[in-house]
Amino acid sequence: MSKRLSRRTFGTVIGAAAVGASQASRLFAAGAAAPDAAAAAAGDASASRTFPPGFLWGTATAAYQVEGAATEDGRGPSVWDTFSHTPGKTNAGATGDVADDHYHRYKEDVQLMKSLGVKVYRFSIAWSRLFPTGKGAPNPKGIDFYNRLVDELLANGIQPFATLYHWDLPQALQDNGGGWENPDTAKAFGDYAGYVAEHLSDRVNHFFTINEFGAFVELGYRVGVHAPGVKLPPGRFNQTRHHCVLGHGLAVQAIRAKGKAGTKVGLAENMTICAPVIETDAHIKAAEEATRQVNAQYMTVIQEGKYTDLYLKNAGADAPKFTDAELKTISSPLDFVGINIYTPIYVRADGSPQGFAVVPHPKSFPRVASPWLFVGPEALYWGPRHVAKIWNVKEIYITENGCSSSDIPAADGLVYDTDRVMYLRNYLTQLQRATADGVPVKGYFCWSLMDNFEWADGYTNRFGLHYVDYDTQKRTPKLSAQFYKEVIAQSRVL
Ligand code: NOJ
């Protein structure tokens, strides 16, 4: 299928998304009073398209995707250094050696955030800057960089939210026993998490343990198209998944033990979002059950402290080996749940014993520049709603959501990314619908502050609100930055 979408297809998507939209559009259509005024008069938040008071607007990045300075100040190599330097692994042989040179330009980047008006920023910490070989003696210059970044954010009125693991495993841990295949990595991760909490929790109140099990474990250890590029057989692979959730649990405990009182901890998971094909009670119920089952290996075991019977049955002899104590660690209570949401799968009720079926996307289903990114705005409604309803979670953040685009500067040098604006408007419409329905979403982090190293895709498929010219490192706000700035200023969908 072509990656480009015709205007007509876009129209269909927008129309479909609007079906579930708030009364605001109806008020507009009827030519009634401006929605804000009408909503305020009616006391109806859903009609206003506004977000609840105190809603936190933010942006996100990750260390290997933006920092560069790959060998500076004692940073040890990570699996992504090795992988990206291996011929044929990334688009055009791209590496994160320089990326956005954020390590040196972080002050300028904080000003970009300030100009957007964001209140929160989610960044990740490069484990191998702090512990060049993953464990042992810390490299003080590593934590120094994050001290400087955190101080700069706070000085500009932006709250730092820190992710401890965004895929850049220290290479030494991979070389010694297979990285996450080895339970020692889970332990080393816990120790590193404790060290970070000890040093940053006086200024950072929110920590995410691990970013997207559903991507780095699957793509890195099963499919082999992300670092470390391994293709494990099912039994070893399921055991690796288990060590990753165990590492999360150990990190939660370490942050509680070493962090300042009041430090909050959660995760940022790209759980599979199951949207009901039609919003009837039967399909919604099926989508809820599907959510538990298709996320059994990560989110469900973290929330429920056990693997579902269906997961264990399907895995058979390849099921992970575990102890009750490990399950207890894995399900250590969290303060909040972060979900990275880009796209849904569609689920319908059926008469099978499991009670649901996944409806595959038709070939013509609209996508944006990344071939995996099907446009399904309702994911931002159903994702948080399922998490709140199924697991009774009271504090939810959308830790990533964004759109890849070709982003070619126009003759005037600006990038008119109307596709990204369309995408964000429709997704935020569904997020607002969730908050209006009482789903406790407390904040939203747009991916990404600026274009960056998009893993195996290299520097193609740009996700930024700011265009980065990689020859000069010049950052230019795109049309979507202007859009997002307005959304933030008014805290409503525009
Ligand atoms: C999720 C990942 O966390 C992030 O690193 C990546 O760039 C975006 N998805 C877009 O693919």
Image (tube, helix red, strand yellow):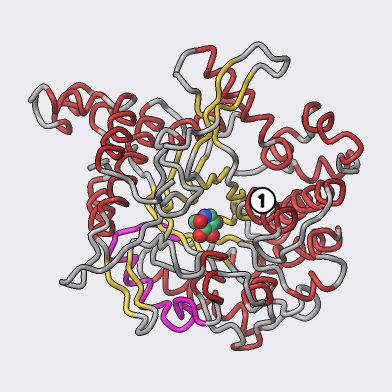
Magenta region: 98-121
Name which residue type carries label 1. Answer: Phe
Q: In the image, what residue occupies the spot 23% across and 60% down? A: 416
Quadrant assignment for the C terminus: top left
Residue 88: x, y in percent? 62, 72
Q: Residue at image x 84%, y 49%?
A: 239
The image shows residue 322 at horizontal and vertical percentages of: 89, 43
Q: Is residue 373 magenta?
A: no
Residue 267 in sight: yes
Residue shown at the point (78%, 32%) measured from the top left = 311
Q: Position of residue 308 (x, y in %)?
A: 77, 29
- To which residue does mark 1 refer? 213
Give the quarter of the image for residue 219: bottom right
Relative to 345, is 482 on the left or the right? left
256 displayed left or right of 17: right
> In the displayed structure, does residue 181 sit left or right of residue 32?
right
